[in-house]
Image (spheres, rainbow, N blue to C red):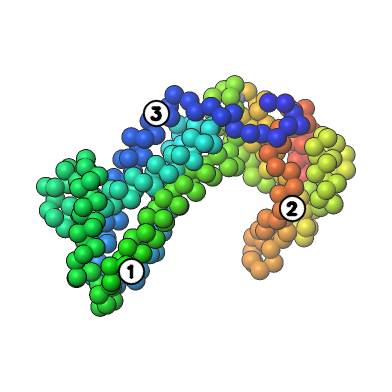
């Protein structure tokens, strides 16, 4: 890591990554069973709210995907992407296994869980049933397949998104084998021309920057990631922000454009920014 470069995850997968597949399978077992329990129990007449349940369950699975990947210290984007696809497929598979086991009797659960061919036969046979109704309407087979395809795409798509974005907004210190801690809104600076600000910041020239005054409408917001152990891994992002008038009371700043993204900065530059911050707190 050199100051002035952009931070990228190292690409290391790490030995703990072997724990991801069984852990995610466990999560899918829980979420998929809950999902199918709901889809099985609710009367078909209220099934219109099911897309909401599908998206919610998929979002939970995506959050778990991100959380597990980070807790196992994975820093490889391709691994994270494939892990997201795997999570979506697990969730889809378990939800069908549970649904079919509820239809055909729970003793068949283990047979279904270990035999994808049997699950596929079950799906086809459900598609041929006539009682499949939503809001009192019996759905034709092609529409059922359409709904199931959407459901499958939601599960796999949302979980893949979780894997894809798992490393976004996170910095890993390879020296200390730990994630750096993020301080959002480390410093508020008076807004200057974004291009000028970006190039000055990248050169480590902070003379042109001044801390923003309380209540200033347009500012630049600095976020910092720093390893709490070695204090050498330091990454900064700078973005434009604007005071949000619509919210009374706290008046938070709405976030605008990212003008410096994940820039590695030296401990010396960090010290300068920190002293600017101390000034701002002392004022
Ligand atoms: Zn460190």
Q: Mark 1 points at which residue?
A: 143
Q: Residues within 10 Å of mark 1 (few under 14, many from 20)?
A: few
First in residue order: circle 3 vs circle 2: 3
Give coordinates of residue 65: x percent, y percent. Answer: 43, 42
Q: Mark 2 points at which residue?
A: 240
Of badges 3 and 1, nearer the viewer stands 1
Above or below, 175 relative to 62: above
Ligand 1 visible in quadrant: top right
What SS does tag 2 mark? Answer: strand
Residue 271 in view, yes or no: no
Above or below, 204 relative to 243: above
What SS does tag 1 mark? Answer: helix
Q: Mark 3 points at which residue?
A: 18
Disc 2 from disc 1: Cα separation: 47 Å
**Does any atom of ligand 1 lie closer than 8 Å to the CB of label 2?**
no
Q: How crowded is mark 2: few (under 14 residues within 10 Å), some or many (20 or more)?
A: many
Q: In which quarter of the image is the N terminus?
A: top right
Give coordinates of residue 241: x percent, y percent. Answer: 72, 55
Q: Nearer the viewer, residue 163 or 180?
A: 163
Q: Which residue: 75% across, 47% down?
A: 259
Q: Which residue: 14% across, 50% down?
A: 106
Q: How crowded is mark 3: few (under 14 residues within 10 Å), some or many (20 or more)?
A: few
Q: Nearer the viewer, residue 232 or 262?
A: 262
First in residue order: circle 2 vs circle 1: 1
Task: Give the number of callouts.
Answer: 3
Residue 79 in view, yes or no: yes
Q: Which residue: 24% across, 51% down?
A: 120
Above or below, 87 relative to 180: below
Q: Which residue: 37% across, 59% down?
A: 149
Give coordinates of residue 132: x percent, y percent. Answer: 23, 69
């Amino acid at each position: 890591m050199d100051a002035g470069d952009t931070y990228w995850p190292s690409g290391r997968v790490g030995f703990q990554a072997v724990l991801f597949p069984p852990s995610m399978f466990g999560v899918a077992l829980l979420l998929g069973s809950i999902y199918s329990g709901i889809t099985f129990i609710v009367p078909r007449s209220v099934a219109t709210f099911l897309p909401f349940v599908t998206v919610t369950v998929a979002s939970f699975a995506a959050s778990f995907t991100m959380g597990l990947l980070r807790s196992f210290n994975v820093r490889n984007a391709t691994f994270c992407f494939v892990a997201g696809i795997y999570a979506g497929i697990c969730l889809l598979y378990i939800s069908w296994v549970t649904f079919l086991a509820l239809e055909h009797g729970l003793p068949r659960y283990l047979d279904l869980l270990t035999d994808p061919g049997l699950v596929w036969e079950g799906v086809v046979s459900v598609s041929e049933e006539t009682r499949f109704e939503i809001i009192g309407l019996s759905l034709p087979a092609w529409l059922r397949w359409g709904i199931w395809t959407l459901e499958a795409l939601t599960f796999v798509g949302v979980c893949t998104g979780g894997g894809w974005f798992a490393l976004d907004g996170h910095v890993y210190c390879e020296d200390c084998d730990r994630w750096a801690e993020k301080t959002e809104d480390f410093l508020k600076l008076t807004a200057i021309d974004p291009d000028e600000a970006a190039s000055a910041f990248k050169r480590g020239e902070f003379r042109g920057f001044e801390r923003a005054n309380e209540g200033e409408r347009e500012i630049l917001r600095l976020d910092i990631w720093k390893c709490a152990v070695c204090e050498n891994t330091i990454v900064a992002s700078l973005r434009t922000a604007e005071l949000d008038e619509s919210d009374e009371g706290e008046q938070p700043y709405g976030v605008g454009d990212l003008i410096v993204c994940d820039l590695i900065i030296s401990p010396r530059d960090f010290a300068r920014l920190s002293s600017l911050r101390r000034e701002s707190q002392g004022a």
